[in-house]
Image (cartoon, rainbow, N blue to C red):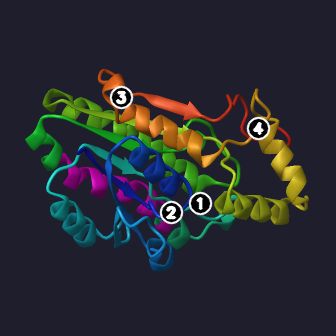
Amino acid sequence: MKRVLITAGASGIGRAMGEAFSEAGFEVWVTDVDASTLADLPKTWHGRQANAKDEAAMADVIAQMGSMDVLCANAGIAGPTATIENVALDDFRACVSVNLEGAFIAAKHAAPLMKAGQSGSIVITSSTAGLYGYPNRAPYAAAKWAMIGLMKTLAMELGPFGIRANAICPGSVEGPRMEGVLAREAAAKGMTRDQVYEGYASGTSMRSFVEARDIANMAVFLGSDGARLVSGQVIAVDGHTENPDPKL
């Protein structure tokens, strides 16, 4: 049975990925910082409490797996919502650490297992914030752009070993994290939550937020043999964003 590791896999996009990979016949391993969500995992999944930026903990989880076919480096935080002059350096560093360092650590320790098997797929969850400038989101955008650079380097470095690397760029995903972003932006700009929501939605050609399962379906495809020659790609699952913030 093929094995997948999903960081931040106990809720949100990560949970949807786990469900989709399970349906595709994978043995699912997840890490998460939230013990309460890990307690609610399906009994057939392997769950471990670990912070994605804790290298020792992540290395231990990956060593326990023994083999790995797919890595979904999905852990991330939204970071502060503020103009650049109002972003504290510690908040900037925290955002970059979880998003970028988390992906780096997972890939670093997954690579030897995949090299041993001469195959594998690394799927990094970036964001449309890694494709466009996002006002008031400097730490998040900086981290998500950097994650794409990491992915492209992994694709070149690991390709000779049969290992692929790609990045998914979700648009605005329905759920608690995005609701937090909407609330913070509304407060910062003196707008209502619905006005901010409409600004994001109207920036897509499909006039819609996406669902976590949309991201999960793409991750499963990228982890499948059907994507055997898809590597080094940045794939937006966002309803086609031309301008991420047209009204704000």
Q: Secondary structure at mark 1?
A: loop
| Circle on res. 95 | 2
Amino acid type shown at disc 1:
Ala
Which mark is first along the chain, 4 or 1? 1
Horizontal and vertical percent for residue 138? 60, 53
Q: Residue furthest top?
A: 229
Q: Is residue 245 above or below residue 47?
A: above
Between tags 1 and 4, which lies in front?
4
Location of residue 213 by image quarter: top right
- What residue is pinned by disc 1? 78
| Circle on res. 208 | 4
Q: Tell me the distance, in whole angstroms, between the alpha carbons under discs 1 and 2.
A: 7 Å
Horizontal and vertical percent for residue 14? 48, 55
Amino acid type shown at disc 3:
Gly
Q: Is residue 83 left or right of residue 128?
A: right
Part of the protein shown in magenta: 94-111
Which mark is first along the chain, 3 or 1? 1
Dot 1 and dot 4 residues touching (CB under 8 Å): no
Any magenta on residue 127? no
Question: Which residue corresponds to the image point at 54% horizontal and 39% vertical from the top-left?
Answer: 169
Question: Which residue corresponds to the image point at 39% horizontal and 59% vertical from the top-left?
Answer: 7
Q: Secondary structure at mark 2?
A: helix
Horizontal and vertical percent for residue 115? 12, 41
- The image quadrant where one finds the N terminus is top left
Dot 1 and dot 3 residues touching (CB under 8 Å): no
Q: Is residue 1 left or right of residue 101?
A: left
